[in-house]
Structure formats: C-alpha cells, structure tokens
Image (cartoon, rainbow, N blue to C red):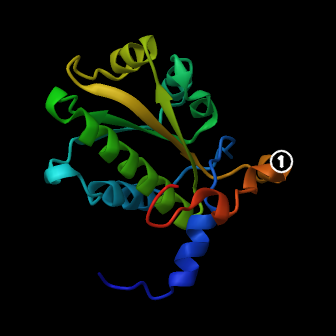
Amino acid sequence: MTQTENPQQFVKLLRKLRSVRQFRPDPIPQEVIDALLEVARWSGSARNLQHWELVVIRERATLRALAQCEGSAKHLAGATLGIVLVMAGSPDFIEQETFDEGKVSERIMLAAEAYGVGACIGWFKGQGRIDAKALLGIPQERLVRTVISLGYPEEEAQRARPKVANARKPLSEIVRFERYS
C-alpha cells in the first residue's frame, strides 16, 4: 500500500467528518458529482462482486418525496443531490452486501468532504423501502436501504450545532489489547 503524501492531513479529514443535514441551494458541479461516483465505483466489495448500483437524484420534488418515505432520510428534503444505493439483494450474500453498502456510503461521504460538500447517510425501512423503489422505478428484487443526501453545508446551521456532538470517549474506554477481559 502506498502511503499518502500527507497522512496527517488525511487523518484530520477523517476526524472532522460530520453528518450535514442542512444545505445551501448551490448546485454541485458535475465534475464533483463524477468524482464522487468514481470513488464509489472503486470501493472494495466482497469477492469483487460490486453488488451496488447508484441512482443520482437532482429533482427537488423527488428528493422531497423520498424524504417522506419511512426511515431516517428527512435531510433529503433540503439536499441539492441524493444518491440512493441499490443493492443486488442476493440472499446468499446479504451480510457481504450490507458491509459493502456501508463502505460505499462512507467513501462517498469522505470524498464529498474533500470537495467541501456536506453529506448525511440515511436509510429507508419497511414500507419506506417499497415506496422509494416505486418512486425511482427500481425492480422489486433489488434492495433499497441506504440514501446519501449531499449539498454545500448551511454554515449558520453548522455553527449552531451543539459541541457535545464532537465529544468522544477516550481510547482507554473503548480499546482492549489481545483479549476483551
């Protein structure tokens, strides 16, 4: 593995990453969107099966409709862009798909941060999954669970966030060496 040119800068990016739920209306340039999609495309997957497809949503009405689907994706209503992850839904690879879905989502979020674009990972559950598939014309056999809202952060909302969100437990409370006990 090749070391990054500036590991401290990369770690700083990882540490400052936060979910953004309020966005300015400014459009995201197509070249930034393309870069995020390339990062997703190159995300690792179990057995290199690449179980995912991505549906990119720019239409405000569709974003608002998806925000109303059961689950936790209300932040889509104010987003500039949404990316819905469509998984193969293979019963033989459900654990792998779930893991890969998380990796793809996090990579999109990290790449967005590098471009100054805020992001928040949301999800659909129960009837919300069915409704989201119907809204987007996704085949029944596919699995829709994860959605990412994207946009330039609303700075006032970011400053108003409680600082407790940045608190983390010390390593001594969460790390064990060799054995749990």
Above or below for 66 versus 109? above
Please name the amino acid that badge 1 sits on: Pro
Q: Position of residue 163 (x, y in %)?
A: 82, 53
Front residue of 61/3: it is 3
Residue displayed at 55% across by 74% down: 11
Residue for badge 1:
162
Q: Residue 67 is drawn in which quadrant?
A: top right
Q: Residue 137 is drawn in which quadrant?
A: top left
Could you tell me which quadrant the N terminus lies in? bottom left
Front residue of 100/151: it is 100
Q: Residue 55 is drawn in which quadrant?
A: top left
Residue displayed at 59% across by 48% down: 151
Outermost residue to the front? 181
Residue displayed at 61% across by 59% down: 17
With 159 as the anchor, is 124 left or right in this view?
left
Say how many tags the image has: 1
Q: Position of residue 108 (x, y in %)?
A: 43, 54
Outermost residue to the bottom? 5
Residue displayed at 55% across by 29% down: 73
Q: Residue 115: in sight, yes or no?
A: no
Q: Residue 71: in sight, yes or no?
A: yes
Q: Position of residue 59 (x, y in %)?
A: 48, 32
With 144 as the anchor, is 29 left or right in this view?
right
Above or below for 116 versus 123? below
